[in-house]
Structures are given as structure tokens and as C-alpha cells.
Image: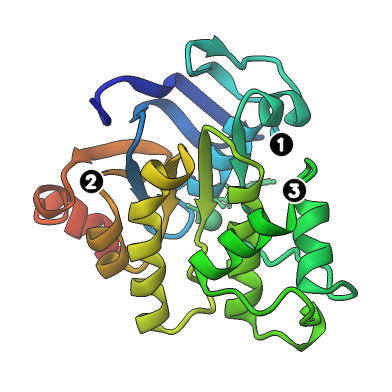
Amino acid sequence: PLGTRPLLEVEGLGVRFGQVVALENVDLVVPEGTVMGLIGPNGAGKSTLTDALSGFLTSATGSVTLDGRKLDGMPVHRRAAAGLRRTFQQDRVPTGLTVGAYLRFAAHRSVTREELEEVRTFLGCPALNAHVFDLDVGSRRLLEVAAALLARPKLIILDEPAAGLAHAESLALADRLVEVPARFGASVLLIEHDLDMVRRACASVVVLDFGSVIASGPPAEVLARPEVARAYLGD
Ligand code: ADP
Ligand code: MG
């Protein structure tokens, strides 16, 4: 059944920037066929974890396994080929392209027009002939998610995809993300500040604080814990 087999297994992950310990001894498992949340206050290490898992940060210690395959030491493109795709917290969509041209380029594989239209309409992205330059920030964020889906990865790590979206749009995106495992065959690790979105999208959630995992489990249970509330009050 979905949600039982481990897809991503992280053991003892550590990252230092000089004297700053950005991540320390992080263990986590993303089960196959699920949407898992990764939350925590600013500076907790969420983006650093994304960089370490995807290979953008090469100094991480510990071990990362995707679908039974060790990713340690692999550069970004090999981790991508192994099925790991991530989006960036900062908008990186080039403004000189149409939506269709961007999606074809960013999918990193050849995609049919039918696939483009399927993903575009699934997420409610603008028409393929729209110009990225004319889009608002929220629409550009959705294009990154669309490109990630088109790549057909096993795991998609979304670093605050709803930054720039209105609250109602965030909740709509949450509803779409819930459908991703069954529809696109990918698990999702969702980094998100909007806890309503996390409750709506995620079967489970992991909380990072000062580079360590302080809680994990179902959102309703985890978000009710006093240590989680304390971590957020310090934000
Ligand atoms: P989050 O995404 O949870 O807000 P980050 O992963 O961006 O947190 O940052 C975690 C910690 O690592 C913070 O203390 C941040 O200042 C530090 N940090 C992140 N990237 C770098 C870097 N390239 N050099 C030095 N320190 C960094
Ligand atoms: Mg971040």
C-alpha cells in the first residue's frame, strides 16, 4: 500500500557553515506515495536541508538514500537523474520566455504538448503562450512546481512554493499537492510557513529547530505540542 515503503531515507545529516551548525544529526524518512511537511522557524535549516539532499551543497555529512539508492557524493544532475527534483525558495523563472518554452526547458526531458497542458491545467497555470514577464509572483511560483512535475521525479522537494500566493491560492495548491502521489507517482516534501496549508496537504510533518528535528508525526498531533509552539514563538 501507498505510504509504507520508505522513499527517502536521511541518516545523521549534518551541515556546518564555519562555526554555524546549520543541521545536526538529522534523521528523517519520506514514505512512498505521500506528502510530508517540513516546517520550522526562519533559520531552522529547511533550505539548507533541501540544498544538501539535492546536491547543491556538497559539504554535508551523513547519508541519503532515495528508493534504495545511496545518493552520497553524487552531483546535482545525478541526483536529479535518480529521481530527486527540488524548487528554490527564491523565484528563479527566467522572464524572457513564454510559459510553454519555460516548461519545456525546465522539465529537463522532452515533453509532449499534451503533458504540458495536463500539468498546466492541473495546477491552474497561465496559458502556454503567456509571457513569464507578464505573470505575477504567485503564477511564476506555480510554474516551478509544474516544471518539477513534468520532470517525472520520484521525490519533489518544494521550498516554500506558496510564498507570493494569496491564502486561498495556497490552500488550492495544497489540494493539488494531495493528488500528486497518485496522479504523478511522486512523493512530496513540502517546506511551508502557512500551517493551514501544511494541515491540508500533509499526512505527516517534521519540525526543524536550530538544525535539529524536534518533532515528527501527523500534523494535528505535532502542531499541538508545546515544544513546537515554543519554536515558533521564537520566530
Ligand atoms: P530556513 O530555510 O529554515 O529559514 P536556512 O537553511 O536558510 O534556514 O538557514 C539555516 C542556518 O544556516 C541559518 O543560521 C543561516 O544563516 C545559515 N546559512 C544558510 N546558508 C548559509 C551560507 N551559505 N553560509 C553561511 N550560513 C548559512
Ligand atoms: Mg528557507
Q: Residue at x 74, y 23 (%)?
A: 78
Give the SS element for disc 3: loop
Give the SS element for disc 1: loop
Query: How many other residues sit within 10 Å of disc 2, few (<14), some (14-19) or many (≥20)?
Result: some
- 1 or 54, which is in the foreground? 1
Q: Which residue is drawn at 48% across and 18% down?
A: 67
Q: Residue at x 23, y 25 (%)?
A: 1
Q: Residue at x 60, y 66 (%)?
A: 120
In this figure, which residue is indicated by the disc labeled 2?
Answer: 203
In this figure, which residue is indicated by the disc labeled 3?
Answer: 111
Residue 37 — which label? none
Residue 56 — which label? 1
Task: Return the disc, 3 or 2, that comes first in the chain's sequence.
Answer: 3
- Using the numbered discs, state the Cα–Cα distance from disc 3 to disc 2 in whole angstroms: 30 Å
Are discs 1 and 2 less than 8 Å apart at CB? no
Can you tell which quarter of the image residue 199 is in? bottom left
Where is residue 123? Give x, y as percent. 51, 67
Q: Label 2 sits on what residue type? A: Ala
